[in-house]
Amino acid sequence: MKTKILATFILVLLIILLVKMFIQPDSQPTSVLGEKEALDAILVQYPQLAVYQTTDLPPSSIESKQSRDGWYFGFIQRGSGVPGILDAKCYYLKNDRTITLLGEYKRGNSSAVDFIDLETCESAEEIPQIPSVSPDTDTGLRLGELGTFTSISILPLSIEEDSRCPVDVTCIQAGTVRLKIQVVSRTGTSTSIVELGQEFTTEGMSITLTNVTPPKNSKIDVEETEYRFNFNVVKQDAPIVTNPSDTCYRGGCSSQLCSDQPDMASTCEFREEYACYQSAVCERQASGQCGWTETADLRACLGTQSR
């Protein structure tokens, strides 16, 4: 009888131990990190990567993707005047804040690559899916939301400045908003900074950031997810020629444009035919418009490059 009671007691004790092993974890679960918190953790350990947050040319960016256990980050450098990605560094940050370098991408002599897989740091053929909406509404675009206009698309990337006067404060100056955007056109993409109310011209289109909501309030912090941006995009009218002898200007990222406006901007994708315009003459044509003077050398160069 005593033997049976002892065996029962031992069996119950074993069951209790097994239950504790499977029900109670050895440690507390790791908290899930937000994107900004995860990025800050990487920049603390690798402060040199902070240069990828700047807006100076050549263009750079930081891309991210969340997994169940952490975050993938790609620190990407593109060229100014050349297509594709020049180099990239990819890291994985687990929720316990351990960081792993997944790999590095170097373009070298390979063909242009527009996207990389953040998990492998290798070229990716599929284009990342970006939320796309029609901009013809009063709601405006969110950060990271692609709006398609007549011949271009605009992707708000980040808020560089929001110095607007709060609605509950009397200010001497109204302040402004400076927004980093990516412009996508038929010829490629470019990254620029636009300012509230200031006209910006690219690819023959006039872009104006007309409104930013919600209004600023000194007592309420606006989260980035709450911002909405309204744009006015119209085709730029041809300039009226008042004096046929007016100066013509070279413009564009590769000096491939000829116009009567100084500092004409363009996207920074390189094409072989752009080299032909380096020795060409930019002047006012018989039509009254600025343009490249057609010569035998220019025709021959363009013909060679197009083959």
Image (cartoon, grey):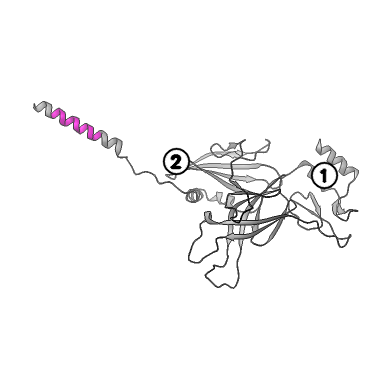
First in sequence: mark 2 or mark 1? 2
Measured as percent of width and height from the top left, residue 292 is found at: 85, 50
Mark 1 is on which residue type? Cys
**How packed is label 1: few (under 14 Cα within 10 Å), some, or many (20 or more)?**
some
- Range of magenta residues: 6-17
State which quarter of the image contains the N terminus. top left
Residue at 47 percent across and 49 percent down: it is 34
Residue on which disc 1 sits:
276
**How packed is label 2: few (under 14 Cα within 10 Å), some, or many (20 or more)?**
some
Measured as percent of width and height from the top left, residue 186 is found at: 72, 44
Q: Residue furthest front?
A: 137
Most foreground residue, 37 or 151: 151
Which numbered tag is attached to residue 69?
A: 2
Residue 26, by quadrant, is top left
Mark 2 is on which residue type? Asp
State which quarter of the image contains the C terminus. top right
Residue at 26 percent across and 33 percent down: it is 18
Q: How many marks?
A: 2
* Majority SS type along the magenta span: helix
In the image, residue 97 above or below residue 158: above
Most foreground residue, 49 or 18: 18
Q: Secondary structure at mark 1?
A: helix
Measured as percent of width and height from the top left, residue 298 is found at: 87, 44
Residue 231, by quadrant, is bottom right
Q: Secondary structure at mark 2?
A: loop
